[in-house]
Amino acid sequence: MAAATGPTVRRRQLGAELRRRREEAGLSHEEVSEALSGMSQPKLSRIENGRGATKVDDVKKLLTLYNCADTDLISTLVDLAKNGAQRGMWWQSYGAHISPELGDLITLEAAASSIRTYQGAFIPGLFQTPAYAREIIKKLNMRPEVNVEALVDVRMARQGALTRSEPITLWAVIHEAAIRAGVGGPGVMAEQLTRLLDRAARPNINIQVMPIGAPAHHGMGGAFTILGFPQRQDLDVVLVDGTLSNLWVEDATGVDMYGAKFDAIRADALGLDDSLAIITDQRDKIT
């Protein structure tokens, strides 16, 4: 399965944290290799660059050598080592159709406790109906070999994160242009807007609309999604949508910047009640 190759976001984070701890301990690659049997310099380099699966025992040995006494951090990094190589379970049969970025997103959504997202062009994937998703996937994928139905199935399965026993808390800001778009025709859009209203009624979901007439705002820079995790805030990541490829922002400074950006977007958008009124009004107009 080609989609499973390369480092996952979690592997990179684990490697970066282990490298940071080594540097704080004042140890070189050579010194670590000399101190730990079986830890060659090339192996340590691969671990720190997230280029391969890292064994739990190796993580424990490295943190012991680095005199790390933070039990919470140790537990978190051990958990990353256990799960860093996993790129999901239920979607493995779709592996041939899933890009590395989507594989990372699915895996992270499964572990996340919160999502904050801004979308300017279309309804976020976690809210999409099958018919709406089908239209979006067909238009955004220029490669003729793309299996649209497989990707629709994957998108629908991902939505289980919103209804599981401990559901993700999702706060979405959607531009009004996406609400008023004619994706798939009136029937598809009416169904999609009804789905939005249904989802907004859930206690773990908030939906705001950025009005068409809004002044300049931070959402004009493009769509992005912030995934938050319960273990440690410094494990939060951001997915920035791009035309040719997506970008993962993993460093704490960058994630904090996007967090502030989302807060500003949320402040400029319509309130929750006014947002739902616009969605309802548009739905009623086309039904």
Image: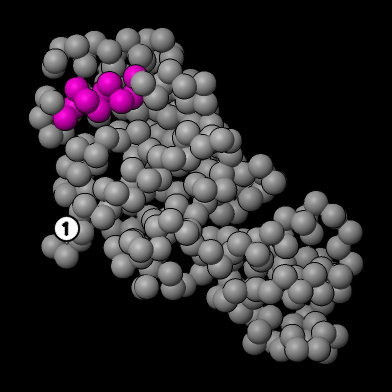
Q: Mark 1 points at which residue?
A: 142
**Residue at image location 66% in from the left, 66% down from the top:** 81
**At which x and y percent is residue 157?**
38, 46
The picture places residue 25, in percent across and down from the top left corner, at: 85, 69
Task: From this view, report whether residue 225 is shown above or below residue 105.
Answer: above
Three-letter code, disc 1: Met
* Left or right, residue 5 beside residue 50: left
- Which quadrant of the structure image shows residue 222? top left
- In this rendering, the answer to whether 84 lies above or below 155 is below
Q: Is residue 93 above or below residue 283?
A: below
Q: Residue at x 85, y 85 (%)?
A: 35
Q: What element carries label 1?
A: loop
Colour setting: one colour
Residue at the (41%, 10%) spot, across then down: 273
Between residue 273 and residue 161, name the one nearer to us. 161
- Relative to 157, does residue 216 appear above or below in the rendering? above
Residue 154 image position (x, y, % from top left): 33, 51
User: What residue do we see at 56% from left, 35% from top?
Assistant: 165
Front-most of residues 119 and 36: 36
Residue 224 visible (yes or no)? no
| Number of numbered tags placed on the structure image | 1
Please report the bounds of the magenta region as a residue range. Answer: 188-197
Is residue 11 a member of the stretch shown in magenta?
Answer: no
